[in-house]
Amino acid sequence: MADNSQYQNILVAVDGSKATAAVLEAGIKAALRNRAHLDILTITQVDQLTDGYSTAGPSADQTYSAVHATRDRMDDLKQRAQAAGVTDVNIHIRFGNPKRVIAREFPADHHSDLIVIGASGLSGVERFMIGSVTNYVSRTARCDVLVVRAAGDTQR
């Protein structure tokens, strides 16, 4: 915990994996304990859709539908936080590299003093190929990071 001071702005980073519920729950508990503002964030990597200006990628309608579905899921997470008693909560959908957005860009923009993130949303092969977002965030964030392992998550 930060040196005897309460957290004021808590960032909960979710990716839709099985760990999302546990990460949100940990963020809610921290927000209630500290009477803090809660930001729930998910990242969409649009660069994968537009690399090379390929016409084989998703259409504008498909991209809109995906963003709309993500917005609905985020609204549900916000309602869960409010139902648990968090009164100051916002949801955010950002585009870009999850490592940079979660570790640096979002916390700088929103003055986050605690990041709550899942142990991993990737398989072992994916972690090897692209690296763990959680590992990057825990090493480079300028604020405290709480890493949450979902029940039954035995990956190490």
Image (cartoon, helix red, strand yellow):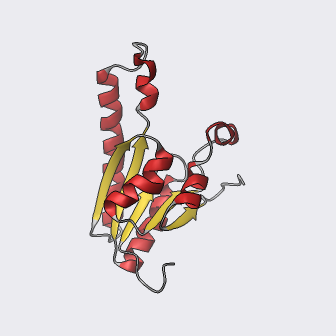
* 109 lies above or below 10: above
* 70 lies above or below 46: below
Q: Work out whether residue 79 can be spotted.
A: no
* Of residues 116 and 111, the one drawn nearer to the viewer in this rendering: 111
Which image quadrant is residue 96 in? top left
**Residue 125: where, in percent of width, then height?**
69, 37
* Of residues 150 and 103, the one drawn nearer to the viewer in this rendering: 103
Which image quadrant is residue 12 in? bottom left
**Residue 29: where, in percent of width, then height?**
44, 72
Which residue is found at the position 39% from the left and 13% from the top? Answer: 55
> Which residue in the rendered view is the most extreme toward the top?
55
* 20 lies above or below 53: below
**Residue 144: where, in percent of width, then height?**
50, 69
Q: Work out whether residue 44 can be spotted.
A: yes
Which image quadrant is residue 137 in? bottom right
**Residue 112: where, in percent of width, then height?**
38, 65
Left or right of 50 on screen, residue 17:
right
Which residue is found at the position 38% from the left and 55% from the top? Answer: 106
Left or right of 84 on screen, residue 125:
right
Quadrant position of the C terminus in the picture: bottom right
Left or right of 156 on screen, residue 122:
left
Which residue is found at the position 64% from the left and 38% from the top? Answer: 126
Number of callouts: 0
* Of residues 129 and 72, the one drawn nearer to the viewer in this rendering: 129
